[in-house]
Image (tube, rainbow, N blue to C red):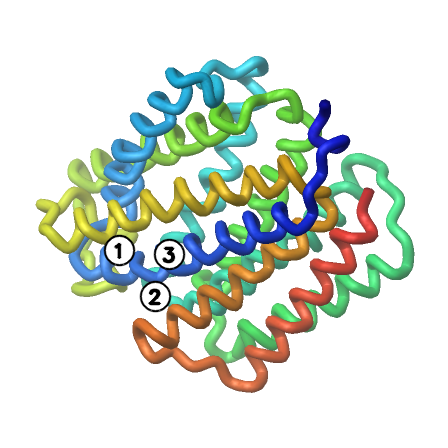
Amino acid sequence: MSVSDNSFPTAGVLCVVGGMMFLGFSDNFVVNIAEHASLWQFHAFRAAIILPMLVILSIFGLGAVRPKKPRAVFARSACFGFAMLIYFGCLAFLPISEVVGALFSAPIFVMIISVVFLGKTVGVLRWTAALIGFAGILMVLRPDAGALTWVSALPLVAAIFYAISAVATRQWCDEEDTITLLFWFFLIVGLCGVAGMIALQMFPQDAPMGPDGFILRGYTAPNSAFWLWTCVNAVGSILGIGLLTRGYQIGEASYVAVFEYSLMIFASFWAFVLRGEILDNWAVTGIVLIIFSGAVIALRTR
């Protein structure tokens, strides 16, 4: 029996929402890691924790590590990895609600890429939803023309590469095992982390103290806090992505995809509980518009 023949929409939704809950919680601790460690060290050490877990799952017959289309998997993993490098880098010095809100503009970019490069046809409803979502992004980020820097655009760059990886997953990697895609994604990100540490060790930068130096630091001796929060994020990533994948396996994709947007709610909730970050009315309205836009695009896309 195929997945589509054995669809459990409620269970699929619960898996997706549960996955977003774990990710929204664990990603909030990146700012704790950024106090003393580096972005590159975080990715390298987290990959060292996660990759053996995936190999063990593969040994027990829960998936395969070897890709069927190596070049396609590498290209998809590189785009996804670049998006996540930017995403986690931004979490160190931007409010998580802003970063997640911008990242979830990805369905808009997926639609644009599908139209421009794949020749897909999109109706008025989805274009209208895209414009509403873009308005929501502006309300969340609220760019100040007088204070714009390259940092302001980074979350949107992450969203673009996230969208490219989503399209690549559908077009090139539809026959690949989930464990395969996870393994190669974390492997590439981990190798980027190692390369970043080596480069900054050879050409050290004047990194400021605290989260502002997250990207500019090389290797620093890991303390107990680094190990604790990196392990928390690693476990959260495995549980979150695992539940998300399971949700897509047992539920209708276009239906359960809408509930990925609960990540913005969980991330904002945990940011308030853990650090007292409060969203103003503009940001809340913007998040609602982004969720509405993504829901319309996901439900209208076949």
Q: Is residue 14 above or below residue 73?
A: below
- Quadrant placement of the C terminus: top right
Q: Is residue 259 above or below residue 134?
A: above
Q: Residues within 10 Å of mark 1 (few under 14, many from 20)?
A: many
Residue receiving disc 2:
93
Callout 2: SS: loop
- The tag earlier along the polypeptide, 1 or 3, is 3
Residue receiving disc 1:
214
Question: Which amino acid is tagged 3?
Answer: Asp
Q: Which mark is residue 89?
A: none
Name the residue rendered at 27%, 63% in the picture: 212
Q: Who is closer to the viewer here, 273 or 162?
A: 273
Q: Alpha-carbon distance for marks 1 and 3?
A: 15 Å
- Quadrant placement of the N terminus: top right
Q: Are marks 1 and 3 in contact (CB under 8 Å)?
A: no
Name the residue rendered at 17%, 64% in the picture: 209
Name the residue rendered at 38%, 35% in the picture: 189
Relative placement, left or right, of 41 versus 301 is: left
Residue receiving disc 3:
27
Instruction: State which mark lies toward you, 1 or 3.
Output: 3
Q: Are marks 1 and 2 in contact (CB under 8 Å)?
A: yes
Question: Which amino acid is tagged 1?
Answer: Phe
